[in-house]
Image (cartoon, coloured by chain):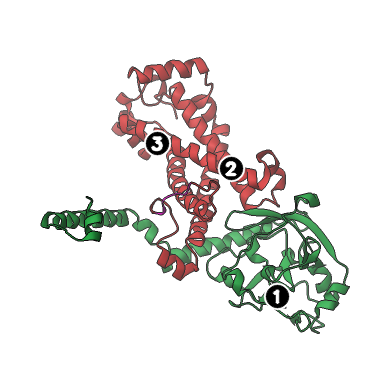
Chain colours: A red, B green
Amino acid sequence: MNAQSEYVILHPRVVPYAHWCWALGVIILIGSGWQIYNQEPIFAFFTFPSWATIGLGSYESAERAHNDIGLAGALLWHFAAMWLLFISLTVFVIYGFVSGHFRKHFLPIWPSQVLADLLAALRGRLDHRLGVRNAVQKLLYVGALLLMLLMLWSGLVLWKPVQFEEIGVPLGNYEGARYVHFFGMAGIVLFIIVHVALTLLVPKVLPPMITGRARRSAVAVQAQGDA
Amino acid sequence: MTIEAKLRDGGLSQSDVVNLKRRLFLKRGLSLSALTLLSGCEITNTGPVDGFLRMISRMNDGVQAALFRPNKLARTFPESMVAPEFRFNAQYGADSVPTINPATWRLELAGAIANKQPWTLEELRALPQTSYVARHVCVEGWSMIGQWGGVPLRALLEKVGADLSAKYVMFRCDDPINYSSGWDVASALHPQTILCLTYAGRPIEPKFGAPMRLKSTVKLGFKQPKYITSIELTNDFRGGYWEDLGYNWFAGV
């Protein structure tokens, strides 16, 4: 009983679950995606360092297991991790709409508010209370969600350019989807850098993303009793 | 003078050697920490992890079979978009491609097929031909538009009384690596799956699988073997050259 009064639910259970599924899934997808990219670079002058990729193992083990230079291993990881992202993203998007989570926490995002909060943050004056997302955060989170959906979309087109031909048209079909998939990845990498940097600056936001709970005293009044 | 230059020209001093030792030590330390960091990746090709990932890949085969639309034709393009010189891709170099004598070449038929009489090239050429300009997609990520012509596989299978309720079709090849590939029957019966005899209106060249290769718009390039010498209809699962090495078996596009 005492614990109930001391702690409040900051994130409904689905949020931390989805968050860590994305963290794991997206990192595997990016690492293996870089290895897949290296097999046939879109930009001849640019490849990813193989130590940063997933799926190669080593040239010796890749040759032994797959008779190649890392493509099969990377594809196996990529098409396994896609399920982690696909399932968690689908569940979260449905939850977000049905429960009102998006409406309550992500919308609306006014450009003037984004600008004001951004300037305040740069001056170090942005108040960061648990349970309240400022306009910059809202924009970043909605942006990351949309980027993941774009990756799913372009990924489906690359996987099945014939079966999913209809949804490939707006992306420029197979060849266009390669570029969309690449730059979408770049956007997500940028998001991760900003996201991790901000978490390091305000580490108190991390435990609630693991447990879902926070001390009542640390949570903004308007978010208490919120689920 | 850099250490590298001294190494080359001689004249290394005691301190240079110490310096080199330090460098090597640092480098080893870095590689070691990189290895620890990447231990998650180094497990990639070990038995259990590879086995687990391949199991998911087999699951994905089932998903792809369910997504497959038997009558969905791939987009076709005007002839002006056909690549004049197609990209050569094989596990062996262009200088070691087989040169098969078209006069003695035969297409063997095996498994659940009523009439297993082998086919000559002339007999295949005498069947009704089809051709299309479409995109070829490689598992490596590149794609190219080409024009392929030949006999729809479905027409041949129906003609020889193949059991179309069988599950798999196996293609075997006469090339330096005994290439092979197993297909699901539904993809084999797709209207754009053909026994390909021509590229851009001319007989296919040796490096692209002469005298006969498989061509389809519903599979990745590695599922379309060159130098085919036999086709088998079967209910027993058949892998293939790259499939057995861990590439996705269905590999549909």
Does residue A44 sit above or below B220 in this rendering?
Answer: above
Write down the quadrant of residue A2 in the picture. top left
Callout 1: SS: strand
Distance between the alpha carbons at the discs numbered 2 and 3: 21 Å
Task: Tell me the mark number nearer the camera, choosing from 2 and 3.
Answer: 2
- Kindly state the secondary structure of the residue where label 3 is placed: helix
Q: In the rendered structure, find residue A179 and report the number of the disc placed on it.
A: 2
Residue A103, magenta (yes or no) = no
- What quarter of the picture does the C terminus of chain A occupy? top left
Q: Which residues lie in the magenta part?
A: A46-50
Q: Is residue B240 visible?
A: no
Dot 2 or dot 3, earlier in sequence: 2
Residue position for label 1:
B228
Closer to the observer: label 1 or label 3?
1
Q: Which residue is mark 3?
A: A193
The numbered mark 1 sits on a residue in which chain?
A: B
Q: Chain of mark 2?
A: A
Is residue A128 rendered to the left or right of residue B150? left
Q: CA distance from mark 1 to mark 3?
A: 51 Å
Instruction: Provide the secondary structure element on which disc 2 rests.
Output: helix
